[in-house]
Image (cartoon, rainbow, N blue to C red):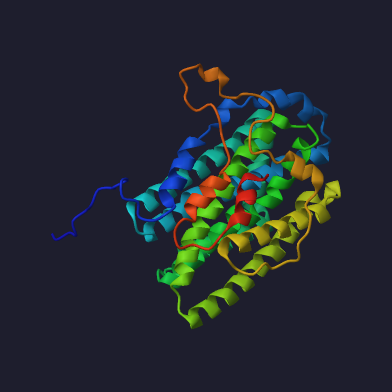
Amino acid sequence: MSHTPFSATNWSEPEDAFSATFYEKYTSQLWFPDEIPLTNDALVWNALSDEERWTYIHASAGLNALDTLQGEVGMPALRGLIGGHIRKATLQFQGMMEDIHARSYSLMNKTFLSAGEEREVFEWVRTQPHLQFKIAFIQDVFGDPDVSRLGLWKKLTVSCMLETALFYSGFFYPLYLAGQGRMVAAGEIFNLIILDEALHGVYVALLAQEQFDGLNDAEQVYARAWYGQTLQTLYRNELAYTDVLYAPLNLTGDVKRFIRFNFNVLADNLALDRPFPDEEIHPVVQNGIRAGGTTHDFFSAKGSSYAKIGVEPLTDADVDALWAGDFPDLSRHAGRVSHD
């Protein structure tokens, strides 16, 4: 049997100007939900109205399904098509982070719900039509047998849509409560997840930009049209999903503005035209977004020998280093990544 010689990973000679930096960033901010005392939120949880609890836990359950999709389907699909040992390692680590996020949402269920309520929520995920449409649509793109440069660009792009825009309808309410000083322990988990997802969206967008730049003129015209149609399909579905989650709380308008804001961020990351006019997001939600810890040192229980005592955002210096190569200036993205 004949094989092409298999090479080892040479971390001394990076394959590009950014993948090793993202890998190091991922490992430096690795965290686990067990380290955050969710039980501190028990009194606040019990004080929430039935409608507030319903929205919070079902938004979280939807996020669980999407992170499961990314960890189980999305990252393995991308990793199988992307060349380069370091790039593959970075995507694999990213997939593991998605699995941690999914487990985090499940721990919230376990903390705040009875076993019967948990089963009900998971059944809701399986039967909620807008959520299942979103999952099936993205699964179809990931599973498309087209492995050309254009096919890979599509897969990278829908992954970015999840990371940078479609997650954010679910993120809105936990940030909204955390911005009011409610559910702040769970809010820490959401902030850590958001920091991870922002980095994931930027990294995969860089890979997508490379693929797009390698397309010929006709392919780029097609790609832009496909992107616009796909975005509008998923955006309309997200509006309907938002109506289900947030109508009981009269927050649908604010959530839809938040979704449009994040679709514009997605366009910036992909170096494509913004699809929507600029809008301000809800100030309480902005207040709920924190790049660092806000309530406690959740690593303190590990003792002084534990080296990971902080989770820091991607800095402007990091972004400058990423763009030392032949990439366009994405200085706008630095603020988005750190949510300053």
Where is residue 6? Give x, y as percent: 21, 53
Residue at the (56%, 60%) spot, across then down: 329
Up-down: is 150 above or below 242? below
Residue at the (49%, 48%) spot, across then down: 71
Where is residue 199? Give x, y as percent: 55, 48
- Residue extending furthest bottom? 218
Up-down: is 276 above or below 309? below
Where, by quadrant of the figure, is residue 57 drawn? top right
Where, by quadrant of the figure, is residue 315 drawn? top right
Where is residue 60? Give x, y as percent: 66, 43
- Residue extending furthest right? 250
Left or right of 56 on screen, residue 215: left
Where is residue 135? Give x, y as percent: 58, 57
Up-down: is 48 above or below 302? below
The quadrant of the picture occupied by the N terminus is bottom left
Residue nearest the observer in this picture, 308 or 249: 308
Task: Give the total of numbered labels.
Answer: 0
Left or right of 132 on screen, residue 75: left
- Residue extending furthest left? 1
Whether residue 152 appears in this view of the structure is: yes
Residue nearest the observer in this picture, 324 or 150: 324
Residue at the (82%, 33%) spot, across then down: 48
Whether residue 129 appears in this view of the structure is: no
- Residue extending furthest top? 303
Residue at the (65%, 28%) spot, across then down: 111
The quadrant of the picture occupied by the C terminus is top right
Residue nearest the observer in this picture, 138 or 110: 138
Residue nearest the observer in this picture, 234 or 318: 318
